Image (tube, rainbow, N blue to C red):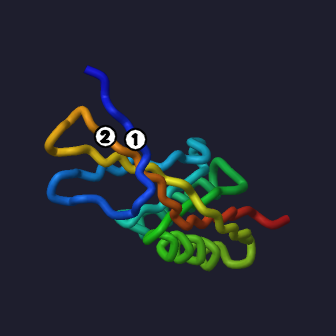
Amino acid sequence: MSKATTSLTSKRFDEKNNEMRRRPPVKPNSAPNHIYITRGTNVESQVGSAEKLLNNSFDEIFIHGMGASISKALVFAMELEKKFGGSVKSDIQTSTVVCTDDIVSLLNLDETETRRRSVSAVHVHLYRTA
């Protein structure tokens, strides 16, 4: 049997007969100096890890946050900037990331639909000043 896949344009779906599965967003970079902040990220422990990266390995780090974690990513960047005093500067960029959700029918498991949605994102570039 082949799976029937369609694209969903409506934002609503029948929650009784369907299940939404969110695909993880594509990460721009997987290098060790790119830090991805989520709602579950512990900022205090990440500050220590980022501090070690800036002191030992890298002259710059990149902090990424999406949706509900944007404010946490900005607080994280400001904590690092405060910790390093004037020796670390930041550049902040915003963007929109397109995420894909799969809507699977609970009545017919071979039937899936995809939905695309836009999510706001922030990217903070922290770098040492000369």
Q: Is residue 87 above or below residue 117?
A: below
Lateral position of residue 111 relative to residue 120, left or right:
left
Task: Determine if residue 88 is in view.
Answer: no
Q: Nearer the viewer, residue 73 or 25?
A: 25
Cα separation between marks 2 and 1: 7 Å
Residue drawn at the location 33% of the way across and 33% of the way down: 4
> 10 Å neighbourhood of mark 2: few (<14), some, or many (≥20)?
many
Locate residue 118, reporting x and y percent: 52, 61
Residue drawn at the location 59% of the way across and 53% of the way down: 53
Residue drawn at the location 55% of the way across and 59% of the way down: 50
Q: Nearer the viewer, residue 14 or 19?
A: 14
Task: Identify the mark nearer the N-term, 2 or 1.
Answer: 1
Locate residue 5, reporting x and y percent: 37, 36
The residue at which mark 1 appears reads as 6
| Element under disc 1 | strand
| Element under disc 2 | strand
Locate residue 60, reporting x and y percent: 70, 56
Locate residue 6, reporting x and y percent: 40, 41
Residues marked 2 and 1 touching at CB (< 8 Å): yes
Q: Is residue 124 above or below residue 28?
A: below
Residue drawn at the location 41% of the way across and 51% of the way down: 8
> 10 Å neighbourhood of mark 1: few (<14), some, or many (≥20)?
few
- Number of numbered discs: 2
The residue at which mark 2 appears reads as 112
Instruction: Classify the position of the C terminus by image quarter.
Output: bottom right
Instruction: Classify the position of the N terminus by image quarter.
Output: top left
Amino acid type of the residue that numbered disc 1 sits on in the rendered structure: Thr
Lateral position of residue 1 relative to residue 86, left or right:
left
Q: Is residue 22 above or below residue 123?
A: above
Amino acid type of the residue that numbered disc 2 sits on in the rendered structure: Thr
Q: Which of the 4 image quarters holds residue 9?
A: bottom left
Task: Determine if residue 12 is in view.
Answer: yes
